[in-house]
Every structure is written in C-alpha cells, then in structure tokens.
Amino acid sequence: MFRRHKPNASEHKRNLAPHGSALPGPHNDMRSFFSLSQLVLSAGHLRPPPVLRHSKITFFEVEILDAQSKKQICVVDKIPPSSTLLDVKHKFHKVCPQWYPSRIGLRLERNGSYLKDSVNIKSLAASSIITLYFTDLGQQVSWTTVFLTEYTGPLLIYLLFYLRLSSIYDAKESARSVRHPIVHLACLCHCLHYLRHLLETLFVHKISEGHTPLKNLIKGCTFYWGFTSWIAYYINHPQYTPPSFGNRQVTFATLSFLICEAGSHFINLSLVHQTQSGNKASFPSPSINPFTWLFTLVSCPNYTYEIGSWVSFTLMTQTLPVGVFALLMAIQMALWARKKHQLYLKRGTFSRWRKAAMIPFIL
C-alpha cells in the first residue's frame, strides 16, 4: 500500500512561487501607501468649491411732486444708477401720457433751476429715494424748428414785397415808377443773408436737441417777420429814393456787407470745428484764414460780423426801418457777447489783453 505524501509549508510556498502568486506582506502594504501619497501630492491642495457672489445693484426711486401744490403725482421706481434725467422723463411719460418728455420740467427745489436732461440720476441722490418737483413747461418745439421758421419767413416776406403785389402797393403807381438798381441789389443781399442762415442751420451748426416753449417761437417770428415787412415795404415802395451819396455809398456798403457775411460764415465754421474736436472749454484760435483773425481782438466775432452786415445794409439802403432793426440787434447781441465773454474770463482760456466782447477796444 502506498501512503499519500502531504507536503509541508515550505514545499507549498515553493510550488506557488513559479506560478506568479503574490504573497501578502508588510512590503506590499508600504508600497501601496507610498503610491497613494504620491497621487495626493501630485493632485495639489484640495480647495473648496467657489462661492458664487451676486453683485448688488442699488436702484433708485424718484418721487415726483407738483411744484405748486406739493402733491405727489407719481413714483418712478427701479431707476438704475447709470440713468439720466431724460430716462426718468420717459418713464414719467409712460405713467402720465398727457405730458411728453419735452414739456416736463424737473427741479430739486420748488423755486430752483430746471435740471438738464443729461444730468446723471446718481449725482442727485442723497439716498435711495429722490424727490423732484414737476412743472408743466407747456407746448414745446425743437430749436431747429425755431431757427428754420424764423429765417424762412423773412426770406419769403421780402420777396412778396419785392414783387410789388397790387394788394400791397398801388398798381398804377407801381407801373409808372422805374425801380432803382439799389432795390434789386438790396433784395439780393437780403436773400443772401437769410439763405446763409438757413444753410448753416441745416448743414453747419450742431443745434441742441433740446426744446423751447412755443411762445418763444411766436416772439421770435413776430420780431423777425414784423421788421422784415417794415423794411421790405420801404425799400420796395414805388416812391423809394436812393442813398444820398449815390454809387460810392452803395459800393462801399455792398463790399462791407459781403465781407461781413463771409466773415460770419468762416467764424461759424471755426466754432463748429472746435465743438467737433471735443475741446469746448478752450477759446477758438485764429487760423491762416484772415476772417478768423478777429478772434485776437474780441471774444464773439460772429456777433461782430452779424452787426456789421446790418450796419452795411443800413448804409446801402439808407432807410429808417433797417437802422432801427440794426440797433435792436446790436443791443441783443451785445448782451449775449458780454455773457459769453464773462464765461471765457471765468475759465481763463484766452490771453489777458483780449478784453473786448464784441467791438474791439470798446465793448
């Protein structure tokens, strides 16, 4: 009988080794721990997930009160800090459609000055609630409409008088009288003056997008249209007499008129160029163009040339209505020039020796 051989522990280990069986032990555990440590170090520091932060935007509420009764009209809410007063007016118009933005006047105080549409709403805020006082400015028209209406009227009215309509002058007297050449020249110069204003309004001047009350348009048209009718009636009358000094006076006045018209145009171009360059605070400097050299003597040469045109037209026609109109225009433009001159002095944007506003060394 054969007995079955039971291998001992050492033989069993030798038999398992050739078949590639791994033996558990302290060495293998250390190697696994080392590999795990290397993996953690290579991954870097563990960071917590980022916390999402929502930006807080502060909205304003605008309380609009009636300037006379102090009663609340409405509250315009959810106004972003970047909004302007014009944005507030548009939202106010949505709440109260009877008042469109151009006729809405808003003030911080009841008797204060009206705020401009370009004012940032954030600059008015002392807290999240802003109180503004409302005033109805009435029917409004754009500045472009004002200028075009004021200048188109004189152009057409003068031509009506120049045609010597029978409804204005006596037909028999008009047929007997022979027009003096100065009548045709005056019509040409008058039309040239207002055509220049119309073309500059359309293509040169950068007119503000703001509005003005309708009553200002009525006053301006009454002034320009009324004086044009008075002037044209006298110059185109069949009994009109030419100037006292004849052709010499007319020639001198015509040359002076054309120079002033050209000067006024080139000055306006210089002012527009200054505005387009973005340097509104500085005073315009004379260029190589000799018509702009007047900048070295006065602050507002455009008014100087404008008055020069009407003084020349007065000498050319030698009529009282033109002289009265030129005087009134000179007074009004002198006030505008002084105001602008004081602004230039306050800014200190030109030389000290240039002290005249409109007339060199005088005013």
Image: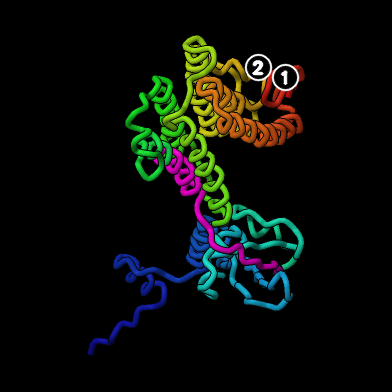
Left or right: 243 with respect to 85? left
For this orientation, the residue located farthest to the bottom is: 1
Total marks in image? 2
Q: Nearer the viewer, residue 300 or 130?
A: 300
Q: In this view of the protein, which residue sits in the foreground, 236 or 71?
A: 236
* Identity of the residue drawn at 47% across and 36% down: 233
Is residue 263 visible in the rendered image? The answer is: no
Instruction: Please report the residue visible at 37 percent of the width from the left and 45 percent of the height from the top.
Output: 167
Residue labelled with disc 1 = 354
Residue 207 in picture, x, y percent from top left = 51, 42
In the displayed structure, 136 sits above or below 152; it is below
Span highlighted in magenta in the image? 128-156
> Magenta segment: does it hold 68?
no
The quadrant of the picture occupied by the N terminus is: bottom left
State the separation of the CA atoms marked 2 and 1. 7 Å
Quarter-wise, where is residue 344 in the image? top right
Residue flagged by tag 2: what amino acid is it? Thr
**Within 10 Å of the Cα at label 2, are there few (<14), some (14-19), or many (20+) other Cα atoms?**
some
Image location (x, y in percent) of residue 224 = 53, 42
Location of mark 2 (residue): 296
Image marks 2 and 1: residues in contact by CB distance under 8 Å: yes
Quadrant of image for the C terminus: top right
Looking at the rendered structure, the secondary structure element under dot 1 is loop
In the picture, residue 321 is in which quadrant? top right
* Image coords of residue 294 (percent x, y): 61, 17
Disc 1 residue type? Arg
* Secondary structure of residue under mark 2: helix
Q: Is residue 206 above or below residue 352?
A: below
